[in-house]
Image (cartoon, rainbow, N blue to C red):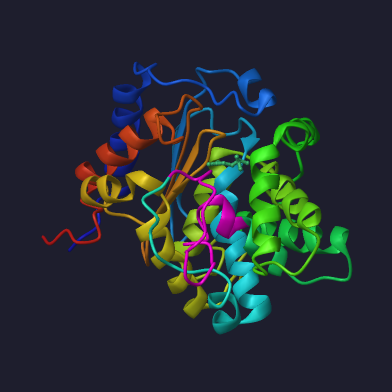
Amino acid sequence: LTPPSSGVVARIIDEVYELCRGDTSGALADYIPELAAVQPDSFALCLATADGQVYGSGDLDTAFTIQSISKPFTYALALADRGTAAVAERIDVEPSGEPFFEISLDPTTQRPRNPMINAGAITAASLVTGHDAADRFERIRRSYCRFAGRDLRLNADVYASEARTGYRNLAIGYLLRGAGIIDIDPDEAVDRYFRQCSIDITCRDLAIMAATLANNGVNPLTHERALTAPLVEQVLSVMTTCGMYDAAGDWVTTVGLPAKSGVGGGILAVLPGQLGIAVYSPRLDAHGSSVRGVKACRELSNRLGLHFLHVT
Ligand code: GLN
């Protein structure tokens, strides 16, 4: 299989961008008040290869909050800090078929069903080690920086907005503490989760984070290792089955790439060994995923033959 030339990739990205640009369906997330304040028409599409070539169209440097795309990266850090077996005692890896905000634990084991829904993500945040709460968040932030290859910062307004209104996530935190799944103060665990969701990124950053996963955990621009290869495999497996929540089956059949979406409007997708894709467009579908993002990933996957089961 000969990969398409860089000219062909650049042209296909521009074509897919133009094709999706006219779709203004969907709605901004507004349950976190600050998220309703973004520019709804922003749109960016970026592809980064595992050897560090970057292609893109649109608002590549517009900042937006990472939201749930943080979940695989914090899960990765929890796995690195505690080991796979210890994390598995607290967080299962089964697709839930439920929305991300579902208040539910497995009835027999009490574990959250996977680390991509909020219950699993709050648990993963609770397992990250550090001297104190500030250090534990700082370790999360720095791990995201290694994936992106640059300094990433907290968006204080989005954080304050979510912290003020995130009662449902607090309820999940208290449920987890009551079930003995998290050992720390549930307020601290949920606060850490709100902070990690409020880290600002750009579409270009997200493509590099995806390319780092595609490159077996080594950032293709800085050559720094962000994650060990066995943990990359674990994280991408969970993204494949659970990353798109209750749309995971539809996503795997039509796009066929491990992926994660966030209510900030970002989507990250990975073709292991090859490339990462990132899309930013903040109008969301009923599952909380970017409408243009899902469409653009479908088109790119079809046109470039990226489905991981695709045989040429
Ligand atoms: N911070 C958001 C929440 O927990 C993230 C949700 C998401 O991006 N799907 O509600």
x, y percent for residue 156: 80, 35
Point out the image quarter for the C terminus: bottom left
| Residue appearing at x 47%, y 24% in the figure | 283
196 displayed left or right of 4: right
Q: Is residue 310 magenta?
A: no
299 displayed left or right of 84: left
Q: Is residue 101 magenta?
A: yes
Point out the image quarter for the N terminus: bottom left
Magenta span: helix, strand or loop, mainly? loop
The magenta region covers 99-121
Farthest residue to the left: give it: 312
Image vertical order of residue 159 relative to residue 190, above or below? above
Nearer the observer, 143 or 187: 187
Image vertical order of residue 229 relative to residue 248, above or below? below
Image vertical order of residue 25 relative to residue 101, above or below? above
The image quadrant where one finds ligand 1 is top right
Nearer the observer, 284 or 42: 284
Q: Is residue 221 visible?
A: no
Looking at the rendering, which quadrant does residue 35 occupy?
top right
x, y percent for residue 244: 40, 48
x, y percent for residue 131: 88, 71
Q: Is residue 1 visible?
A: yes
| Residue appearing at x 60%, y 42% in the figure | 67
x, y percent for residue 233: 43, 73
Nearer the observer, 95 or 226: 95
| Residue appearing at x 63%, y 64% in the figure | 124
